[in-house]
Amino acid sequence: MTNPCSCRPDCCTQGAPAGCEKISSPFVPLPAAAPKDIPCCGSPITKPAGPHEMPGYTICQFVRNFTETPTGRVPIIDTRLTGRDWLGAFRVRLGIFRDAYQVAPGIYGAGSPGPDSPVLVTANYKLSFDTLRRQLGSVDAWIMVCDTRGINVWCAAGKKTFSSQEVADRAVRCNLTQLVRHRQLVLPQLSATGVSAQKVKQLCGFEVVWGPIRAEDITRFLKNGMTADETMRRVTFSTTERLVLTPVELYLLAKPLVRVLAAVFLISGFGPGLFSFHAAWSRGLYAAAAFVLGIFSGAVVMPILLPWIPGLSFSLKGATTGLICAVLLPRGLSGTAFSALMLVVMAVSSYLAMNFTGCTPFTSPSGVEKEMRLAIPLQAVAMLAASVLWILAAFV
Amino acid sequence: MKTFRYLPGVATLSLDDTTCVGCGMCETVCPHGVLKIDHKKAAIIDPDGCMECGACATNCPVHAITVTPGVGCASYIIQTWIKGKEAATCGGGSCC
Ligand code: SF4
Ligand code: SF4
């Protein structure tokens, strides 16, 4: 006997659910209201398939509906984020699943967009997309998502995956000329590093209007007749913006830290009797604490206190917070041992602080390189001196 | 961003004001207010605020601006030192 319902024959011991017997037509509609008391394979029957479901596709949970347009069916997105979006964002911020957080490139709608609605262009990194979507509220607009390989607007523009060619190609592929009557694209200002307004115009005929830097200004920008004031045009780097960057920094350090700690315990074992496992463990713990403190100082304290630490060079700022954090080192060490660990905290902190330049929107590559040429040798010397002092301390 | 400053006197930004046609595009796209239109010509008003992103140069219709754009990221620069400019990647880096 064929079994038209999806459940295995052996599980339907309580009688097949309604709809299972009618095998005459292949297009059997599922019961509108699934009987709650009949469990199928242990779980209640879920909602019937929606009108927009297609074989081989999954409808993204942020899609609220679909609208028919001259260019075909376009998904209308929800402008509120759900718990799942926040959870996803949270995981990405922590550094887990960073690589696969993308949305499909193409055209989406928000509100009830029409032929005169503005076209907002963004990257296909889900966080960028979500940030924009959340700000739209009740605005009617089209969102054109470019294929930036799942990288955010700023970095994608820097790496040229968010490029004039990609924007123009996407506009053609999305049949924008059929979709809207106007010939304008609103691009985030930070994509200007990769996108040339002039080139986009040449390639696809659409004029680029530079939108605000932050998505939170987009509604204000649209209300002002697509003009951005000074504040929308300037990049910021607030405490919150800096804070959300720190977990990823820490996560990325986990792997190299294992190797470094192995070396730390090894060095700590050297002493009067050449090598002692007892010393490797007991002294190693102190040294490991110094490393952790250095990481905390360079990857957490320094980014948060960035604007308030005196100086311009990041490595110097990191060394400063390292020096202050060194007061947290465990008590009861000899002077030599303490100096060694203090050097470790400062060097580690300085190095990581220098790495933080990659996350900031104001450090020039020429400046970073200049700073590094001076700082890296100093950091290396400090680490070498620390190792020598630490081994010496075992003898005194 | 006047609250955040970085090393002065290093930016590679330069402007040829004889070619400049004063269209104002560079002023619009610069995220740091480095350029300003003055008497129908662009002028560099805050050279030390420049982060060498290259947005102005990319968008200048007459190529009046030159800047060596790059990735201001320490781990990337270390890679360029070791492996050379071509092989360096930002992969797994914290910046993106
Ligand atoms: S974009 Fe070029 S031409 Fe236009 S104002 Fe700036 S420098 Fe002058
Ligand atoms: S390179 Fe970037 S920061 Fe520097 S002037 Fe041009 S747009 Fe402004």
Image: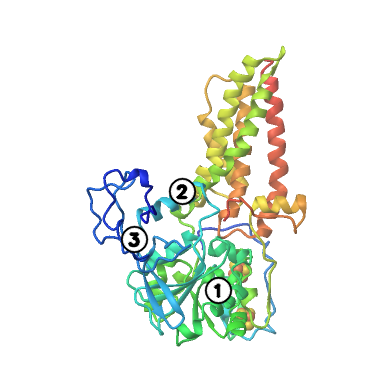
Q: Which chain is mark 1 on?
A: B
Q: Nearer the viewer, mark 2 or mark 1?
A: 2
Determine contact: label 3, label 1, CB under 8 Å. no
Of all chains, the one bearing label 2 is A
Classify mark 1: helix, strand or loop.
helix
Give the amino acid at mark 2.
Arg
- Identify the amino acid type marked 1: Val
Q: Taking the image as four quarters, which one is ligand 2 found in?
A: bottom right
Determine whether the beta carbon of the residue marked 2 sits less than 8 angstroms from the nearest atom of ligand 2. no
- Which mark is first along the chain, 3 or 2? 3
Residue behind mark 2:
A91
Number of the label disc, if any, that sits on residue B29: 1
Q: Nearer the viewer, residue A190 or A329?
A: A190
In the image, what residue occupies the spot 59% across and 66% down? A157
Q: CA distance from mark 2 to mark 3?
A: 46 Å
- Residue A23: assigned label: 3
SS type, badge 3: loop
Residues behind callouts 2 and 3 on a single chain: yes
